[in-house]
Amino acid sequence: MTDVSEGKVTVDRAGKRKAEKRDRLLAAARLLFIQRGYHETRPQDIAREADVAHGTFYSHFNDKKEIFLAFANEAQEDLHDFVATRIPEVEGYEEYLHFALNAIQEFSEQNPGLLRSALVDTKVLDPTDSTSKMVRSKFASGFIKVLMKAKVRGELYDDVDPELMGHAMIGLIQSTAPQSYRMGKSREEFVKLMATFLSRAMVKSPKDTAG
């Protein structure tokens, strides 16, 4: 019985050490993807930053794409959890949109470079790389679900495609938010502009049509 107990403790310790090394690799990848970008980060760089042997990287991840997906999934889950805590009970899509956009911008301000790094176009150096497509689809999924429900409730125009527009909203936010800050606009101004634009584009009878 003692031998069995000692064996279990040994296995548990080994599993804990392995999990800790994986967490260190993910933390290092997060730091480097934000600082250097996807294309300039190599597996050996991540291993060095995590203070583990280069070979240890491949004990946890097959390649850079796999750890990037893990990093992006973690970023998406962090964003989802953050946004969920900041959206109260709302009456419809328009109200949801305002709270969601504000929460996304607040998250971006608290985590500089995270969303930009997670949504990088991985096809720049490899046209066959579909990694960014998978990542964008996951980030867009929240908007898609809300748009589908709003369409069922009859809030949106009949020709609105929730899946297409969910992806479009991610791209719009990604491209316009940095430009908005460069123009000196506050988060509140940006959110109002985007919410008004998107409401007018998809909602049959938008409540907030003020210029």
Image (spheres, helix red, strand yellow):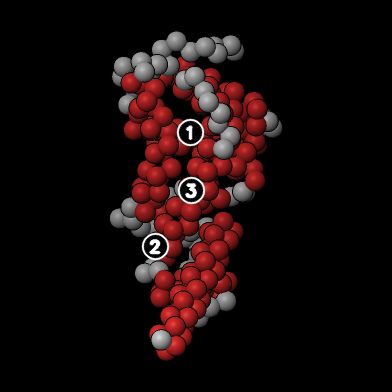
Q: Which residue is mark 1?
A: 172
Find the distance from the CA under tag 3 to the CA under tag 1.
20 Å
Residue in front for this viewpoint, 146 or 208: 146
- In front: mark 3 or mark 1? 3
What type is the residue that disc 2 sits on? Answer: Glu
Q: From the viewer's perspective, is the residue at label 2 or at label 1 nearer? A: 2
Q: Residue at x 43, y 42 (%)?
A: 139
Q: Secondary structure at mark 3?
A: helix
Spatial distance from mark 2 to mark 3, Cα to Cα? 17 Å
Quarter of the image containing the N terminus? bottom left
Nearer-N-terminus badge (3/1): 3
Instruction: For residue 196, say whether it is visible.
Output: yes
Q: Gap in Å between the C-alphas at discs 2 and 1? A: 27 Å
Question: Dividing the image into 4 quarters, which one contains the C terminus?
Answer: top right
N-terminal-most mark, 2 or 3: 2
Q: Is residue 115 above or below residue 208?
A: below
Which badge, 2 or 1, is on the more N-terminal residue?
2
Q: Position of residue 171 (x, y in %)?
A: 45, 37
Q: Characterize the local packing of mark 2: few (<14), some (14-19) or many (20 or more) Cα atoms within 10 angstroms.
A: few
Q: Is residue 3 above or below residue 128?
A: below
Q: Quadrant of residue 125?
A: bottom left
- SS at badge 2: helix
- Image vertical order of residue 190 relative to residue 34, above or below: above
User: Dot 1, crowdedness within 10 Å: few (<14), some or many (≥20)?
Assistant: some
Residues 6 and 127: in front is 6
Q: Which residue is mark 3?
A: 77
